[in-house]
Amino acid sequence: MKERAKKAEIAFVALVAALSAALCLVPTGFSSPYAPGTSLSAIARITEVDNSMIRRIGPVKDGEQQLEVEIRSGKFAGLSFPSSNNLVGKMEIDKFFVPGDRVFVVMDLAEGGEKVGYVNVIDHFRIDVIAVLALAFFALLVALGGWTGLKSVLSFAFAGLLIFKFLMPAMLKGANPVWLSLLVVTILQASVIFLISGFTRRAVTAFAGAMCGVAATAALAELATKLLSIHGAVRPYTETLLYTGYGHLDLTGLFVAGVFIASSGAVNDLAMDIAAAMNEVRDKKPDIRRTELVASGLTVARQVVGTMTNTLLLAYSGGYMALIMTFIAQGVPLANVLNMVLVSAELAHTLVGSLGLVLVAPLTAAAGGLILVDERKRALEPEPEALP
């Protein structure tokens, strides 16, 4: 039996790895704005900066930086070109360069790609640091977790690829964001849980509880969005999509999908904690009754659900601290703040995610009682003799 389970686990790991490789090769279906052969990206270094056309108003800068850029990679390495950097006075999107900065550039090519027409400085070059952080994360996972850590790396990569290569392109093409996101979350929950725990009753319990929690969160998000009259344009850059040729998008559906996608990781974690604890109790006491096991699961749930909801609150609140601080600094009354759509949307995001997390606890405990305990087997076992 163990040998067969091991083979099934290896086969599932191979399947997820193959799907991940396939997703790497599959194009998103959306092409670059640059025609083939008319542009080339490279790493460059800022050698000179002229800030004479920059105006400063407090911490904000606007105007135009004149730059001298030295290409450091590719066929034009070693050549220098002039460029410019326009600042519009919005710190969240403006870039400000100083001599010595490494930058990512896109060169507009001319004469069949043999000459550089203009160098567009996109932003500071950050890919190498991101790659180092990712490799350190993966290496630490494998070093500490061994085979399980390697499967965690695979599930992490698969999740990122599925979202970037399948979910987002499909939504841009007009797929229903809520139903498609539910499908993707189901696939991700299955891949994470069964990769880590194998095809066991514990894994099935965790998957059932997690999916019940995700479904409940999706339903609550849909209801809260309607009751609070929240439109989907509350997220950064959402409205920009409408003005770039994607007016068909269901922005409210995107908001709802974002709520349960964001909480699905915590839901997965809580469901696995409860399922693992119930499985351990069942292993220590094989003759435990279903109601007793469910009660044990609820006891565990009460201990962990409080910390998990705090985890969600802290994770979400970090994203809108500046927004709340702005209102506090201006002395805006609390009632006014709570009725603003931006604040209401964030509160709905936090509270609905927390509600779904609380609901997953009893749902997982109930699923564990049904899956982990075989009452038919217990019925066939002889009752223990009474003590004299």
Image (cartoon, grey):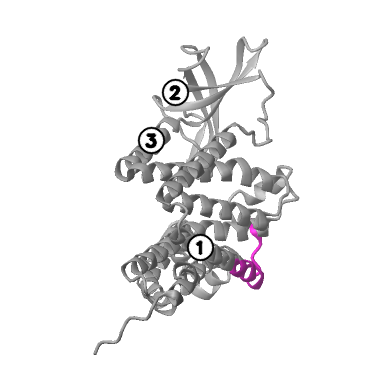
Q: Regarding mark 3 in the picture, which secondary structure is present there?
A: helix
Question: Closer to the N terminus: mark 2 or mark 3?
Answer: 2
> Is residue 128 visible in the rendered structure shown here?
yes
Q: For marks 3 and 1, give the one nearer the viewer.
A: 1
> Is residue 325 visible in the rendered structure shown here?
no
Name the residue located 51 percent from the left edge and 58 percent from the top edge.
264
Looking at the image, residue 147 sits to the left or right of residue 357; the answer is left
The reply to whether callout 1 and callout 2 are in contact (CB within 8 Å) is no
Q: Regarding mark 1 in the picture, which secondary structure is present there?
A: helix
Residue where numbered disc 1 is placed: 210
Looking at the image, residue 31 sits to the left or right of residue 75; the answer is right
Residue 221 among magenta residues? yes
Toward the viewer: 283 or 146?
283
Give the residues in magenta: 219-233
Distance from Cα at disc 1 to Cα at disc 2? 50 Å
Q: Regarding mark 2 in the picture, which secondary structure is present there?
A: strand
Question: Closer to the N terminus: mark 1 or mark 2?
Answer: 2
Name the residue located 35 percent from the left edge and 43 percent from the top edge.
141
Question: How far from the left and from the top, in percent, is residue 8?
Answer: 48, 46
**Residue 159 numbered mark, or none:** none
Looking at the image, residue 14 sits to the left or right of residue 130; the answer is right
Residue where numbered disc 2 is placed: 46
Residue 232 among magenta residues? yes
Question: Closer to the N terminus: mark 3 or mark 1?
Answer: 3
- Residue 253 vs 149, above or below: the answer is below
Residue where numbered disc 3 is placed: 135
Name the residue located 36 percent from the left edge and 66 percent from the top edge.
277
Q: Amino acid at mark 1?
A: Ala
